[in-house]
Amino acid sequence: MDEILLDAEERMEKAITSLERDFGKLRTGRASTSLVDNIIVDYYGTPTPIKQMSSVSIPDSRSITIQPWDKAAFGLIEKAIINSDLGLNPMNDGRVIRINIPMLTEERRKELVKVAKKYVEEAKVAVRNVRRDANEQIKKLEKSKDVTEDESRQGQDEVQKLTDAYVAKADERGTAKEAEIMAI
């Protein structure tokens, strides 16, 4: 029973971690290296993340600089950034690639809030799926007479408490992200 609960808690925590990672991809008007973390460059036929082929830094709150280690990669990185769905315009001065983060319009902020809510909902669904799996495992233990009916019910109550806590965490993170997006 304890193993089932520990496994469920671990998997629910992973859902929240995944939510945080998804939030890192959302552009909030402030520069963050996580914006370009998931951009993949076709580097000599090999899909390579930008952070593995250059140093990425934040010189100020409105821009990102990318300094490729290989001069031949400048064009490839620029092309990958332009083709990404972030809507960023890289500027290449021959030494570094600069990305200026434009201010977000009200309309764009509302779109980002919708995307954030979708991420929160996906995290909640993941948490609920973990709950379902854990409850099924507990019911199997009860059917095989490894635990009593009372222990089964108690285990399911514990799983529900975990679920409620992690759904609340997802909502909390979502509300914070929404406030961050809407802040000017």
Image: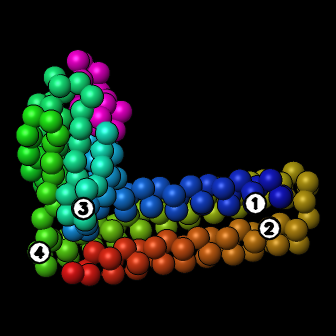
CA gap between label 3 and label 2 equals 50 Å
C-beta proximity under 8 Å, tags 3 and 1? no
Residue drawn at x 54%, y 74% is 169
What residue is drawn where x is 90% and y is 60%? 147
Q: CA distance from mark 3 to mark 1?
A: 44 Å
The residue segment tinted magenta is: 41-54
From this viewpoint, is residue 125 visible? Answer: no
Q: Is residue 131 above or below residue 77?
A: below
- The location of residue 76, given as percent across then percent down, is 15, 30
Q: Nearer the viewer, mark 4 or mark 1?
A: 4
Q: Quadrant of the C terminus?
A: bottom left
Mark 4 = which residue? Answer: 105
Q: In the rendered structure, are the residues bearing label 3 and label 2 in contact, judged by CB atoms less than 8 Å apart?
A: no
- Count the marks: how many? 4
The picture places residue 179, in percent across and down from the top left corner, at 33, 81
- According to the picture, the residue beneath numbered tag 1 turns out to be 5
Q: Which mark is residue 175?
A: none
Q: Marks 4 and 3: which is nearer the front?
A: 3
Mark 4 vs mark 1: which is more N-terminal?
1
For label 4, the crowd category at 10 Å Cα-Cα, with few meaning under 14, some 14 to 19 and many 20 or more, is few
Question: Left or right: 135 with respect to 150?
Answer: left
**Label 2 to label 4: alpha-carbon separation:** 48 Å
Q: Amino acid at mark 2?
A: Gly
Q: Earlier in the sequence, mark 3 or mark 1?
A: 1
Visual colour scheme? rainbow
Per the image, the residue denoted by label 3 is: 60
Q: Residue furthest top?
A: 44
Does residue 53 show up magenta in the picture? yes
Identify the residue at image location x=60%, y=60%.
Answer: 12
SS of the residue under disc 4: loop
Q: Quadrant of residue 52?
A: top left
Query: In the image, 156: left or right of 21?
Result: right
